[in-house]
Amino acid sequence: MKKAGVIFLLAAVIFVVCIFIFYNLNLRNFKERIQTAEAVIDGAANFIALALSENLFTSDQMYEAALNDAQSYIQSKLQEIKTKYLHVLSASIKQASAQTVEKIKDFQINFTSKNLEVVLKIYDENRLRHLTEKLAFVVIDLEGLLSSLGFTDIVLCEESKLTIHGIGCKPTTALLSSGDYLFSFLVSVTSVVFIRWLSVRKMVQLERKYKDELLKRTQLHEALLKFTELILSGNTEQASQFILEKAVEFVPGAQAGSLLMKEQDHFVFTNVCGYDRKFVDRMFFKVEELAQGMNKEIKIIRNLHQLNEQSLDQERKKLLYSDERVGQIKVLLSVPVVVQNETIAFFNLDNFETEDAFDERSIEIALLLAGQVGLLFERIKLEEELKKQKEMLEYLSYHDSLTDLPNRRLLEECAEKLFALARREEKSISLVFVDLHKFKEVNDTFGHPVGDQILKIVATRAQRVVRKNDILARLGGDEFVFLLYNSTSEESAAFARRLLFIIHEPIVVQNITFSISANMGIAFYPTDGDNLETLLRNADMALYVAKRKKVPFAFYKESI
C-alpha cells in the first residue's frame, strides 16, 4: 500500500512538472506571438497612415475643403476612407491647437483602448502648407486589424499582464490544451510503467507501445523541424525533396511519391522519390488534366491510368510512362497543399502492391505533413510581403516621392557622415543651395502636373553633373541642395555654371518648350558653418543676394 502511494505520488509530481513545462513553453510562444503581432501592427499602421497621408490628406482639394469647412466634400472623402480601408470605425476632421498640430510631423499613431488612432496633418498638394488648427482623426478597430493580419489567436481584453502597445490581450484558447494534459499524463504513466516493468509484463508491453509511438512522433517532428530549417535558410528545392522523402517514409503504405507544384496555369513535377527523374523537367499537367482535381480534398485514386489515358496527349503520356514503375501504380494518395485558400501543390504518394494500401492513419499523417508545409509556405509568403512593405516604407522615408532624390532626412544623415570625413581629412565641403527661377509662375500657368515633369527633368539633369562622392537632395518645392566634397571656390563656381547650363537647356513638356533658370547660394564647411542647418541658412542668405543682384550665384562671404 505504501509502495503504491509512492508510485502515485511520483506520477503526480511528473505530471505537475510536465504541465508546468508546457504552460511556460506555451506562455513563451504566446509572448513571442505578441511581439510578432506588435511588429506587424506597427508596420501595417505606418503603411495605412502613410497611405492616408499621401492619398487623402495631401491634396489641394482636401486642404481647401478643410480650411473652408466644406462638409459635403469632407464627408464624402471620410466615407471613402471607411469604404477603402478595412476595420475603420470612424474618420473625422477636428479642431486642434496650433501647438498640438506642430508636434505632429506628418502623422501620429496612438493606441487607445481596443482601437488604433491615426492623427494626420492636412497638407496642400506640394506639402508647402498645412492647416495649423485642424487635424484628421481615423480610428481603426485594432482587434479586427489583428484578425485580418492573421493573428486570430489573440483577443484584446481590459485587464491582462500581457499587452500589445499597452492594451491588454490574451489567447483565444487556454494556454494548456487537452493534448498537453494528455501528453503529461502519458509521460507520468510511462514513467510509472518503466519503474514496474520487471514485475508487470503487460505494463512493459504498454510502455513499449507508448515509446514506439512517441519515437515516431519525435522523428516526424524532427523531420518537420529540419524541413523548417531548410525553408528558412532558402534551400527550397532541397526542402521539397526532403519532405517528400519523409512523407514516403512516415505515411503507412507509401512506397514512392512525387511533388506537383503550380507554375502559372499548370502543374509540374518538381521532385520525385522512387522514380527516374528523366521526365521531371518536361512533364506538366493542365488544371483540367489533374486526376485529383482542384477541390482541395485529399483523395485516394485507384483508376489513375484510366484517367491519364483520357486526359493526356500521346507525347506526354509516353513521357510519363517512360519509367515502368509509373505503370505499376495500384493506388495514389493525393494530398493538396493549400495556402490562402489556393492549392499550390500536391503530395502524390504511391503504392505498387494493393489498392487498399492507404488507411485512416495514412491519411492522418499525410494531412499533417501537407498542413505543416502549407503553414510554412504561408508564413514565408507573409514574411516576404512584410519585408517588401518594410523596404518600401524605409525607402519612401528617405527619398523624395516625385524625383526619387534623397530628401531632407537622408541629406541630414549623409551630411553628418560627410562632415566627419572632412574633419578627419581636413577637407572643405561646399553647399550649393539651388532655387529655380520663377517656377511658381509655371505651376500657376500650366498646372502642377507640368511643373512636376519639369522638376523630374531638372533632377535627372542635375544628377549628371555630380561626382560619385557628392550628394544631391531635394528639400521640397523647387529647392535643391548639393554637397560637393573637397571643392574650392573656383571649383564650386565652375560647378554652378555647368549646372546652370544644363538646367537652362530647353525642356519640352506636353509639346510646350520651357527655358528654366535658377539662382544659387554657396556656403562652405567649415568656414561658413560647422553643421548642416547653419550652412543651409547661410547658403540661403547668399541665394537671396544672388536674386537681389540678379546674378546666377553668390557666395555667403559676399552676402555678409
Image: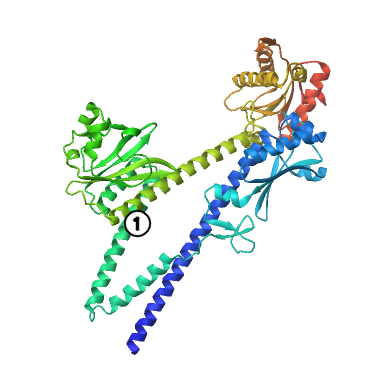
Q: Quadrant of residue 10?
A: bottom left
Instruction: Using residue 436 as the reference point, say whether residue 22 is left or right of it.
Output: left
Front residue of 159 and 103: 159
Q: How is the image coloured?
A: rainbow
Q: According to the image, label 1 marks what residue?
A: 221
Q: Mark yes or no: residue 528 visible.
A: no
State whether residue 439 is above or below residue 117: above
Specify whether 477 is left or right of 351: right
Determine crowd level at label 1: few under 14, some 14-19, many 20+ residues with C-alpha closer than 10 A: few
Residue 487, relative to residue 332: is it above or below?
Answer: above
Q: Is residue 120 left or right of residue 342?
A: right
Q: In the orientation shown, which residue stands out farthest toward the bottom?
A: 1
Residue at x 78%, y 15% (from the top left corner): 551
Seen from the viewer's position, the closer of residues 151 and 425 is: 151
Q: Which image quarter: residue 518?
A: top right
Label 1 element class = helix
Position of the C terminus, as image quadrant, is top right
Image position of 69 with respect to 158: above or below? above
In this rendering, the count of numbered labels is 1
Residue at 32%, 60% in the rendered image: 217
Image coordinates of residue 124 in percent, x first then y, are 75, 31
Can the viewer see residue 482 in this picture? yes
Residue 273 at x, y percent in the picture: 24, 43
Q: Position of residue 440 (x, y in %)?
A: 77, 20
For residue 521, which quarter of the picture? Answer: top right
Residue 108 is situated, as x and y percent measured from the top left of the image, at 70, 45
Q: Quadrant of the N terminus?
A: bottom left
Which residue type carries mark 1? His
